[in-house]
Amino acid sequence: MEWLRIFEKLMRKIFPSTFTIALFLTVLTFLLALLLTPCADIHHSAKPLHAELATDPLANSGSHLLQITAFWYKGLWDPDMMAFALQMMLILVLGYVLASIRAARHLIDSMLVYCTSTSRTAFLVAFLTIGVSFFNWGLGLIFGAVFARKAGEYAVMRNVPLNYPLVAAAGYSGLMVWHGGISGSAPLKVAETGHFISLVGRDIPPVDFSQTIFSAMNMSVALALILIVPAVLGLTGRKSPGTGISLIPSQDTKVLPKGNDLVGAERIDRIRSFSVSAGLVCLIIAVFKAACSGSLNVIDPNFLNFALLGLSLVLSRNIAGFLSSVTDAMGAASGILIQFPFYFGIMGIMKYSGLVEVFSGFLIHISTQSTFPVFTFLSAGLVNLFVPSGGGQWAVQGPVIIEAAQNLNVPLSKSIMALAYGDQITNMLQPFWALPLLGITGLKARDIIPYTLFMMVIGMIIFLAGLLIFP
């Protein structure tokens, strides 16, 4: 593993902060749009998207640079993307709350006794993180980060040598399975009735979870990931066991005011039965809605957040404890909050200039019916570097993939999952979603990148095998 140590040193020298990366990608997208796309005549454009910019003076200035600036600004504050950002932040925040409750902490503490070496710790963290992330990406991300942090503290207390960046990378492995899981943005959206009308203007039947998430291909791929990735990281831990680390133990819970210190209605916030009752009402409504729907189409981001809210309220100590966890979660989400608009701006350029069609269209046009899923996977991985949001990427790249899939007679479900696989695999290179994990573990992106890139190679082999083997 000498090459891994050399690569790790190199990354520490050249890898900047994630916010700087967002700025670099913004500049790069501007340059690519200038070089690869023409200046559009907004008033006479055949693209319906350009009608949204008909009154924008920058878009109609005749200057290509100013027009791209208008595209960037339009994407920066896109109301649909802002609504999506709120959905995704709620998934993250509520996932954080669930990972912070006493039951989850007890589960992590009970597993720490097995963290006696880097090899065992990396295997265990990756195995559980991937499993949890298949259920919910926000919960998996925070669970993996908290588990990695606790494993580091456990190693410090017992003077156990530990490759802490490797363990933290294992805690990030769930982002390699999330889009193929129950909280995946594209599978959730295509399961909504009427979604394809808003996306491509045609009434295509919804594609439910039985064709995407719970298909034979995806379940086989998920099983391969949860078995192979932890095993490989465990073997890596044997070759690179690490040394002693310096880590200040974190506090599990905040000290809340005692009952005697509370005034009037403040006592309601400390009544556990009130929190449980509110949560049960949410869960009952969610179950009733799912039962009335009679299909998996009901599982969209709003339904998922509503169910997570109910679970969080039921399992929290009380309302005060729930709000305390929410406050902590918002701190972990602060980096995402400030960077999301910049990526939306990149998406605006990609969407309105036609740059995404240049990227994905080139690979799609050279595809055949058998190679189309592979090229979709590769193009989605490339686009994800510029649009690190599964739902945002689906909104931008989805229409191109749907049209091509139907022209080539490729099943929509397989094409959708190919995009999901491409989106999630390059999360191991794009550090955007690692922000909460880095904040919790106290590491830098350059510390974990050597190991996440290693996981990316393993994941690419598994995903490509799944796309080629299954019809």
Image: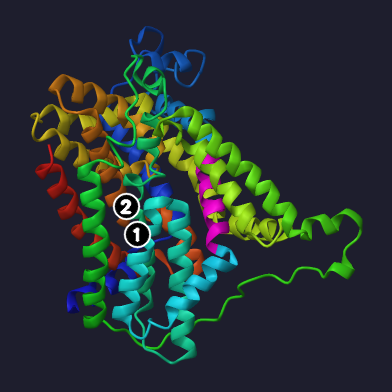
* Image spot of residue 263 (x, y percent): 91, 60
* Image spot of residue 57 (x, y percent): 51, 18
Q: Is residue 359 visible?
A: no
**Which quadrant holds residue 72?**
top left
**Which quadrant holds residue 111?**
bottom left
Q: From the image, tell me which residue sits under label 1.
A: 130
Residue 209: within the magenta? no
Q: Residue furthest bottom?
A: 159
Q: Quadrant of the N terminus?
A: bottom left
* Highlighted magenta segment, given as a residue range: 85-99
Amino acid on which disc 1 is placed: Ile
Q: Nearer the viewer, residue 10 or 375?
A: 375
Q: Residue at x 52, y 37 (%)?
A: 303
Q: Tag 2, which secondary structure? A: loop
Q: From the image, tell me which residue sits under label 2.
A: 177
Asked if marks 1 and 2 touch (Cβ < 8 Å), the reply is yes
Amino acid on which disc 2 is placed: Val
